[in-house]
Amino acid sequence: GYLDDQFVQLEELQDHANPNFVEEVVALFYKDSSRLLLNIDQALEKKPLEFTKLDGYMHQFKGSSSSIGAKKVKAECTLFRDYCRAGNAEGCMRTFQQLKKEYATLRKKLEAYFQ
Amino acid sequence: MKDKRIQATKNEGYQTMDGSTGNNGGKGEHWKEGDSEKKLTALVMDDPFCSKVEKAYLKSLGVDVHCVETANDAFKLFSDGRSFDLIFLCSILPGINGFMATKMLREMGVQSKIVGLCGLTMEQGRKSFLDAGADEYCEKPLTAAKAVHFLRQIDPNYKPPYSTTRSQA
């Protein structure tokens, strides 16, 4: 699945005191991740690649995807960071394309969840 | 010259900046002898998204939580005399990063338990945070089970209001 146990735990935190908790968390996640993805997209256009900068963005993105339970996206983040540390530009670009696909699928799943 | 050294709250009481001690060990007016319902306090220093999740877990565990987005906001709290049992600190913060913030909090005299947080694995992140002066490290996400582990280190008698054992650690 796309969402791991972390997402289930977030659902469990929703109660009468926080009736919209999951929705709010997801909305914040979108905002945060859109910004990070844009930053990474822009950074990937600068040649030669600034691996440290890219690694920094991805590190943040990994933190937020794991907080929402986005298992597959998190896995791509780890892979991307490995390529950054190896200075492998092609690996980074390829992984990022894959990451964006996983992210798009994740958003679809989350949207379906809220219907 | 105003003494800016702050003693953070520990179980055994606190000392305010002018040196006076709370006459009940600093446990607050609503705390009664034998009352095991004393709330632990936590400061979360992280981005708005992660803070929301972390705060929700901690609140559900009966912890009083305050969130800030920057190290400077945190420093201001401590200069104003606030104290917390536990500080969760993300490595990535706008402006002063989490490692520097940890060093600076220790230099200010903050003795609260500091838990570093970020997306790095235990092997990758732990050393950097501990070198900066943190007590512990936690790989994100902070879950209820992990939080209970740290809360018990501060208060061995701490009992979570619900079972966290089925949670992914």
Image (tube, helix red, strand yellow):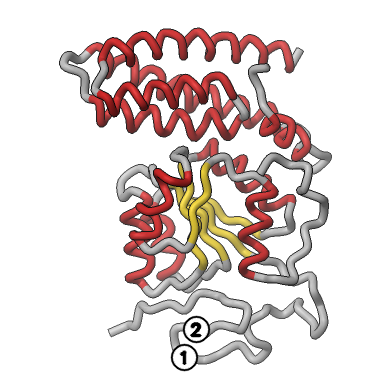
Residue A22 pos. (x, y %): 70, 30
Q: Quadrant of residue A84?
A: top left
Amino acid on which disc 1 is placed: Gly
Q: Are marks 1 and 2 on the same chain?
A: yes
Residue A90 marker? none
Name the chain letter of the residue that bears numbered label 1: B
Of residues A96 and B106, the one drawn nearer to the viewer in this rendering: A96
User: Looking at the image, which residue is at 51% across and 23% down?
Assistant: A75
- Position above or below: A69 against A102: below
Residue B19 marker? 1
Q: Pick the quarter of the image with the C terminus of chain B.
A: top right
- Position above or below: B136 against B108: above
User: Looking at the image, which residue is at 28% across and 10% down?
Assistant: A90
- Check disc 1 and report its element: helix, strand or loop: loop
Which residue bears the numbered disc 2?
Answer: B16
- Check disc 2 and report its element: helix, strand or loop: loop
> Is label 1 in contact with label 2 (beta carbons under 8 Å)?
yes
Residue B80 pos. (x, y %): 45, 70
Residue B55 pos. (x, y %): 62, 48
User: Looking at the image, which residue is at 41% across and 19% down?
Assistant: A37
